[in-house]
Image (cartoon, coloured by chain):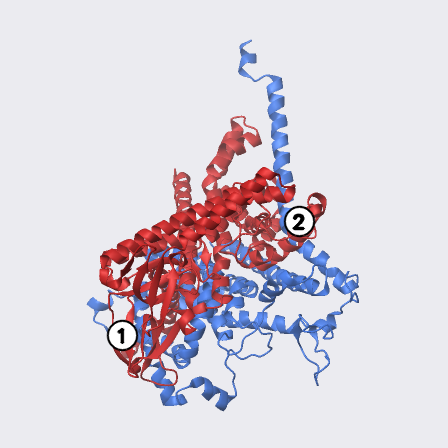
Chain colours: A blue, B red
């Protein structure tokens, strides 16, 4: 009798077993369902785009579009030479809409390249500094700030870029170009001054805290450079650099141009690249760098010869993920460029990216039509591109983690 | 011997280390500058600036609030200043650039007023007199004029309130009812009576007038009904200005937009954002947690699960506009279109659910933030030591009991972190919303006292889209700028607070697990 009362009744046991099975089943079903729903995005885009090439589009011009006509220059009435053009809204019915994806792809990649040109040096520099030179206390404080930077909405950055930065850069063009030279030299000058300071002063501004105490110094430099910008413009460029560039170099200047987009989107991409690259650098097993330093390498040599090669796959994947983000960013490009589908390399011209193009045109496109399907094709291209880039980066990263574990596994 | 001594070097750590340090400093500088710019401009918008009476060298006079100053284009010296002069109906423009050199004198006389009007933007000038039916007060009456003006404006706003109440609660329901069926005589009488009362109220609102004069001498007569607020910033003390600043902030948060989104407040946008985000988190939390639990606790940990995990993680990196396209194609045109043809066929061709709306926007953003929640929850689940699960199982718990009683409660902070991060991301996303249901100006809030109270099919306003629309589609960008700054500040504040909460939460979780691991 006593044994029976201790162990639960068979019914209760059975009930618990069934409940467990049901629960597991429900979780499994829901989990798989959710994951399938998320993955359905790709399937949906493919299903919607396929009729474009098979010719079963349900609209008036139901002939299939071949891939060549989307990517190669086309002969349009009214033009002498074959052209790359994206002009979806025909002005009159007689006009044929011009669908060439090349200028859109060009604009997308151009914006991303300029953003990376600005972001990669800064972000990698910051990652190197905080992984190798920064004091630990500061490092723990800086990470959340950079995470906050990542969370800033694109629409706010785009607004600042399009309405504040773009006109400002236009008025202080000389100063902005001068900053490219002034800032690195200024940083080096700060380093030289710090090395020359007497010990009692220089220990107050150590390299480990340079991330903080350089800020006022750099702010002063920026203010100074932009302040003397009008004088430089009068001195060198007859008072107006835009006209000078137009006359001497034949360069057009659009207020909202690739340079501004590069700055703004670079700003948005920096935190992504920074935090991933920093993780990769900080994850290198300590035994490696300790070994190098024990052999007499300086901190910089350790970094250059040991840490960077070891962490290079991680840094590569950080840049890849940054590129994926730059390619897909919509609001910044939409607000900081003129959205004209140009195909130039000049940083002073605008562009029209795929993402911005979708945001502008999709609400007006008739569902099922060629225009609609082409915009969906753009979305599919963006999806496939970012998904592949991210998957590659993720695979590289997980390989790297395994390698770190092997290398540092003994400790 | 000399060779062994270290050469005195220019830089102790080499140039690379310093340039790297510059990367950190420059990034931080940019963040700080951006935040300072938004905060400064956003908060300064509500401060009532002094009105200057400017006399130019040419003898011309005008009054305006100085906005900013910048160097003359193409010249090293000299600058020009932008004044907001108001009076768009009198002068044709409410902005004026003046070369600083061309200014003769600037004074701030106390009797200058700035009047917010319902039409034509602000008026800047002098208040000459207030005319009522029984008496009139002129500027020489001093305080009596202002007291009287205040009282009469309060009366007008009360009348307006009465009229709106009558309109919304009596007239509209009646009119709707009448639309559906024929009118009975009693209803006809009621309708006539309400209309008469509304007209009477409107007449009463227009009883009093003010006579205004701009500094250039043009006169203007306005009924008090057309005024929103009369201020004399030059006569205000610091405390009064502070009070006016507070009132400005409150009105910004609690009122609707005016003048094509270039003036007024953002209350509908705040409401729309909050509604959308709430609905989204209700949708995303259970599904995200379930998927994470499945991936981490139930699914066999093989190659396929690893691939799925990487896939889900990568979806967080897919551009948000692609989710917008998916939402438009599947939710709006697909599901919404079928719902319309099934249940709302009598409303067609005007779509009910077949167009962007609150529900579709929330669903799209839920999908967008699902990876965020899954990844955060999974991370939390992975951090729970296996000993906890094994302990529960060893005591005879089934898997579901171990999960529900032991593992999930421990993972709650991680789930919260994920949901907060998801909310922060959703609050700032604009691109997908442009496709699935955000409106430039929503006439109706998605929640009201009409059955079924929450109208999921309605379009809504959103803070982020408000920034885009006011800054890029408005007519007078200059006038909209301060408002856009203020809206941006609000959005950034919300997101920063949410993110800080998430960071703190994550910090405490990590600290807790470290302690447990060391025990």
Which residue extends farthest top? Answer: A1
Q: Nearer the viewer, residue A272 or A136?
A: A272
Q: Nearer the viewer, residue A369 or B186?
A: B186
**Residue ID at (72%, 78%):** A74
**Residue ID at (56%, 71%):** A339
> To which quarter of the image does residue A391 belong?
bottom right
Q: Nearer the viewer, residue B144 or A232?
A: B144
Numbered disc 1: what chain? A
**Residue ID at (72%, 47%):** B341
**SS under mark 2:** helix
> To which quarter of the image does residue A110 belong?
bottom right
**How far from the left and from the top, in percent, is residue B280?**
54, 46
Q: Which residue is mark 2?
A: B336
Identify the mark at residue A193; answer none if there is no mark. Answer: 1
**Residue ID at (60%, 77%):** A343
If the image is split into quadrants, where does the N terminus of chain B sit? Answer: bottom left
Determine if residue B230 is in view.
Answer: yes
| Up-down relation of residue B479 to residue A76 (above or below) | above
Closer to viewer: mark 1 or mark 2: 2
């Amino acid at each position: 009798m006593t044994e029976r009362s201790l162990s639960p009744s068979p019914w209760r046991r059975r009930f618990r077993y069934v409940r467990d099975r049901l629960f597991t089943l429900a979780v499994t079903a829901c989990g798989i369902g959710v994951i399938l729903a998320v993955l359905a995005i790709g399937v949906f885009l493919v299903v919607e785009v396929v009729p474009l090439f098979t010719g079963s589009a349900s609209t008036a011009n139901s002939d299939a579009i071949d891939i060549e006509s989307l990517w190669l220059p086309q002969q349009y009435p009214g033009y002498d030479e074959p052209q790359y053009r994206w002009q979806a809204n025909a002005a009159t019915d007689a006009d044929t809409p011009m669908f060439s994806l090349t200028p859109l792809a060009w604009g997308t990649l151009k914006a991303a390249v300029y953003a990376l040109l600005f972001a990669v040096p800064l972000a990698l520099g910051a990652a190197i500094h905080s992984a190798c030179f920064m004091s630990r206390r500061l490092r723990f404080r800086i990470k959340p700030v950079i995470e906050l930077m990542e969370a800033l909405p694109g629409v706010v950055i785009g607004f600042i870029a399009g309405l504040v930065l773009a006109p400002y850069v236009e008025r202080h063009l000389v100063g902005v170009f001068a900053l490219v030279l002034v800032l690195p030299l200024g940083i080096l000058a700060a380093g030289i001054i710090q090395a020359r300071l007497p010990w009692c002063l220089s220990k107050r501004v150590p390299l480990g805290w340079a991330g903080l105490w350089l800020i006022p110094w750099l702010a002063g430099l920026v203010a100074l450079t932009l302040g003397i910008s009008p004088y430089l413009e009068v001195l060198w460029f007859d008072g107006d650099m835009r006209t000078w560039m137009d006359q001497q170099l034949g360069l057009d200047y659009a207020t909202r141009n690739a340079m501004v987009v590069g700055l703004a989107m670079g700003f948005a991409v920096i935190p992504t690249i920074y935090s991933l690259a920093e993780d990769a650098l900080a994850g290198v097993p300590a035994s490696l760098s300790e070994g190098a330093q024990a052999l007499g390498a300086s901190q910089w040599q350790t970094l250059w010869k040991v840490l960077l090669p070891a962490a290079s796959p991680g840094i590569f994947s950080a840049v890849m993920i940054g590129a994926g983000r730059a390619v897909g960013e919509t609001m910044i490009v939409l607000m900081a460029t003129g959205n004209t589908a140009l195909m130039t390399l000049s940083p002073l011209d605008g562009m029209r990216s795929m993402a911005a193009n979708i945001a502008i045109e999709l609400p007006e496109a008739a569902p099922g039509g060629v225009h609609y399907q082409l915009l969906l094709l753009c979305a599919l291209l963006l999806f496939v591109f970012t998904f592949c880039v991210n998957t590659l980066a993720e695979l590289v990263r997980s390989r790297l983690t395994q390698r770190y574990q092997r290398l540092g596994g003994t400790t | 011997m000399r060779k062994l001594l270290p050469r005195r070097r220019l830089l102790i750590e080499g140039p690379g280390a310093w340039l790297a340090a510059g990367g950190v400093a420059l990034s931080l500088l940019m963040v700080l500058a951006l935040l300072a710019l938004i905060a400064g401009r956003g908060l300064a918008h509500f401060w009532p600036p002094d009105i200057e009476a400017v006399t130019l060298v040419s003898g011309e006079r005008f009054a305006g609030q100085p906005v900013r100053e910048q160097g003359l284009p193409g010249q090293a010296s000299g600058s020009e200043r932008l004044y907001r002069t108001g009076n768009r109906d009198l002068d044709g423009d409410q902005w004026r650039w003046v070369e600083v050199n061309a200014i003769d004198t600037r004074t701030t006389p106390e009797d200058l007023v700035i009047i917010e009007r319902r039409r034509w933007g602000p008026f800047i000038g002098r208040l000459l007199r207030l005319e009522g039916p029984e008496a009139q007060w002129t500027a020489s009456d001093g305080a009596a004029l202002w007291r009287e003006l205040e009282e009469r404006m309060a009366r007008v706003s009360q009348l307006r309130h009465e009229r709106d109440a009558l309109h919304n609660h009596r007239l509209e329901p009646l009119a709707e009812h009448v639309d559906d069926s024929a009118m009975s005589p009693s209803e006809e009488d009621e309708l006539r009576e309400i209309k008469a009362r509304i007209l009477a109220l409107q007449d009463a609102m227009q009883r009093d007038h003010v006579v205004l004069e701009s500094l250039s001498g043009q006169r203007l007569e306005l009924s008090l009904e057309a005024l929103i607020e009369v201020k004399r910033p030059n006569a205000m003390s610091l405390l009064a200005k502070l009070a006016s600043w507070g009132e400005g902030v409150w009105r910004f948060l609690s009122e609707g937009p005016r003048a094509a989104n270039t003036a007024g407040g953002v209350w509908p946008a705040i409401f729309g954002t909050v509604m959308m985000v709430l609905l989204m988190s209700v949708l995303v939390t259970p599904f995200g947690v379930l998927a994470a639990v499945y991936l981490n606790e139930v699914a066999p940990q093989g190659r396929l699960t690893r691939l799925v995990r990487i896939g889900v993680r990568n979806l967080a990196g897919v551009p948000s506009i692609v989710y917008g396209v998916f939402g438009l194609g599947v939710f709006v045109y697909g599901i919404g279109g079928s719902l319309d043809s099934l249940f709302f066929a009598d409303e067609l061709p005007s779509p009910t659910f077949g167009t962007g709306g609150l529900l579709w926007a929330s669903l799209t953003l839920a999908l967008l933030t699902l990876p965020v929640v899954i990844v955060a929850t999974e991370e939390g689940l992975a951090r729970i030591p296996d000993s906890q699960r094994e302990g529960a199982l060893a005591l005879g718990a089934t898997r579901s009991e171990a999960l529900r009683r032991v593992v999930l409660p421990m993972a709650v902070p991680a789930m919260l972190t994920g949901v907060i991060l998801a909310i922060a991301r959703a609050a700032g996303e604009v691109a997908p919303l442009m496709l699935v249901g955000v409106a430039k100006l929503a006439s109706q809030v998605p929640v009201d006292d009409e059955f079924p109270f929450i109208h999921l099919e309605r379009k809504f306003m959103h803070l982020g889209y408000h920034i885009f629309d006011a800054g890029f589609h408005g007519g007078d960008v200059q006038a909209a700028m301060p408002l856009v700054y203020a809206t941006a500040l609000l959005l950034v504040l919300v997101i920063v607070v949410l993110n800080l909460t998430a960071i703190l939460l994550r910090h405490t979780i990590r600290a807790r697990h470290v302690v447990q691991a060391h025990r």
